[in-house]
Image (cartoon, rainbow, N blue to C red):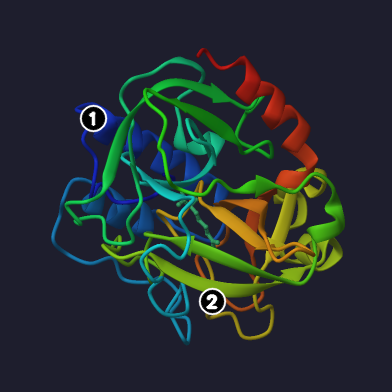
Amino acid sequence: MCCAHEMDTDASDARGKSLKRSARCIKRSIAVGAAVAAAVALQSTGGASAAPAPTPTPGQQIIGGPPAKQGEFPFMVRLSMGCGGSLIREDVVLTAAHCVDGSGPNTSITVTAGVVDLQNPKAIKVKSKEVAQAPGYNGKGKDWALIKLAAPIKGQETLHLAEDDNFDRGTFTITGWGADKEGGAQQRYLRKAKVPFVNTATCKKAYGDQLTPGDEICAGFMAEGGVDTCQGDSGGPMFRRDEDGDWVQVGITSWGEGCARPGKPGVYTKVSAFSAQIEKAANKLMG
Ligand code: ARG
């Protein structure tokens, strides 16, 4: 959870790790200065003062639209370190590499599924068993990871991965419990929004060498901003309908400069570039 708050952390050491990750995330975010680093650290340690948004953006309802309806996105899960994820098998969650600490046996993550309200007593909560981070992940591109669950989550629809770049266009849905504005608090209720595809040339102009074009896909309203993922949404899916009307995952929330700023689209891991590798890695997770 790059820069996310610690609202639902339950692992005792997650706070320290979170701060480390926050630092890593901020390093990548060129225009986010030390003031925000301090504010994030404050929030991460439970400080009460709200972070001032460094550059106020108009229309800061980041996740943009209304809250999601119960059952609308059954594949959407919340991870205890403050990230999102998608259920791609009954016992495998896809998230961002920057949300986890490498690969191997791991029982420290709690996955919450089946609810839009994180405080709903009917929430399904399952522990992790193993984590597989993208091979060669070093903080640039390749921002994906898998979490094998200690038990399958039954009765929730899984999300299919885009197998080629046919779906890397059009309008995408983004969902998450992350901040509803730059520097804002984590949300109790799942939010959703729609963002248009931004082509690689345009995104490259916005981000220069920070962008890893083959690995990443951008989305957002270039001219006006105002709708975006934000801190705490990382690892969650960006998805659209396929020709049969089924949801297909095209992206994993990864990073952006600030949130919802005009000219600074959200950057997502390009699922179609990694789906074969992801499926292979999922098959290799211990049963
Ligand atoms: N890195 C952030 C996280 O860990 C996600 C930021 C997405 N930012 C954006 N402007 N789309 O939650």
Query: Which structural element holds mark 1?
Result: loop
Q: Position of residue 91 (x, y in %)?
A: 47, 30
* Quarter residue 118 falls in: bottom left
Quick check: can you spot residue 135? no
Asked where in the image residue 16 lies, by quadrant, the reply is top left
Q: Is residue 7 above or below residue 169?
A: above
Q: Is residue 205 above or below residue 59?
A: above
x, y percentage for residue 224?
62, 86
- Neighbours of disc 1 within 10 Å: few (<14), some (14-19), many (20+): few
Seen from the viewer's position, the closer of residues 120 and 255 is: 120
- The circle drawn on residue 11 is 1
Residue plotted at (62% across, 15% down): 284
Q: Quadrant of the N terminus?
A: top left
In the picture of the structure, the residue carrying the numbered disc 2 is: 227
- The kind of secondary structure element at disc 2 is loop
Q: How many marks?
A: 2
Question: In the rendered view, would you say 12 is above or below 161?
Answer: above
